[in-house]
Image (cartoon, rainbow, N blue to C red):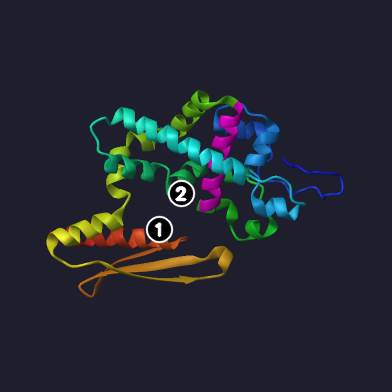
Amino acid sequence: MSRSKSSHIPAPPPAINANVADLLGAWRIRLDPDLVVTAVTHRSFAYETGGIEHNERLEFLGDSVLSIIVTEYLYRKYDTFTEAQLSRMRGAIVSQQTLSEVARKMGLGDFILLGKGENLTGGRDRDSILCDTFEAMIGATYISHGLEPTRSVVESHLRPYLQNAVELGKSSDYKTTLQEYCSQAGLGEPIYESDSTGPDHARVFSATVSVGGVVIGRGESTSKKAAKSEAAKEGYFALTNQD
């Protein structure tokens, strides 16, 4: 699977799996092969091979298409839920964590075209890259087929998460959940502290949350927000398991 503007550009290094047919089989719909290559081309690879087109524009489109598909699904299925409840459910389903999980299950990482640096530092399995590529594939599908076929593809991949939307929504925002619990229990405001280690391209964030001067939860992730969320989750269950 390769793409170049002219013959003087060196042939790009192959993906783990360069078979477009295999990718489309996993994706569950036929697309133009050139558009597929754009969808799986990370900017690091594009820059190394002479500024060829990468997937960020398709990812931008796919993000919006995904949002409307999931929003409409939840709006129709959960007609008695409030805007806040629906928002939490949607946030959990379209999150980087969920989309990267789906991408891994279909083996999407094997098809991504990455620059040498990203390849060497585990970019093929990085949540952010998997999530962005998944959204780029949604964008490519929308360009090729329009909304309804894209809806079918998206819902087929996200079905387990859509079916579990209520529970996912309850647990998607642990910082808010912990804060509400602490307020109701008169425990005071949760206090977060965070730190990071490693080089810029492989930064790892760690966080703690304290209540009343006592650390009740710790978290670690590739983003500060996710690390704090993990800390809040651990802290919330630490408190509620004492009840």
On-image quarter of the N terminus = top right
The residue most toward the right is 8
Task: Decide which of 104, 197 is in the foreground and name it.
Answer: 197
Q: Position of residue 8 (x, y in %)?
A: 87, 49
Say which element carries label 2.
helix
Q: Which residues are magenta?
A: 128-144
Task: Decide which of 172, 121 is in the foreground and name it.
Answer: 172
Residue where numbered disc 2 is placed: 96
Q: CA distance from mark 2 to mark 1?
A: 10 Å
Residue 241 in sight in this render: no
Q: Residue at x 61, y 43 (%)?
A: 57
Residue where numbered disc 1 is placed: 226
Q: Is residue 139 left or right of residue 69?
A: right
Question: Which of the labelled discs sits on residue 161, or is there none?
Answer: none
Residue type at tag 1 = Ala
Q: Is residue 130 magenta?
A: yes
Task: Decide which of 54, 197 is in the foreground and name it.
Answer: 54
Q: Is residue 159 above or below residue 50?
A: above
Q: Position of residue 210 (x, y in %)?
A: 26, 70
Q: Which of the two labelled residues, at mark 2 and mark 1, occupies the earlier sequence position?
A: 2
- 10 Å neighbourhood of mark 2: few (<14), some, or many (≥20)? some
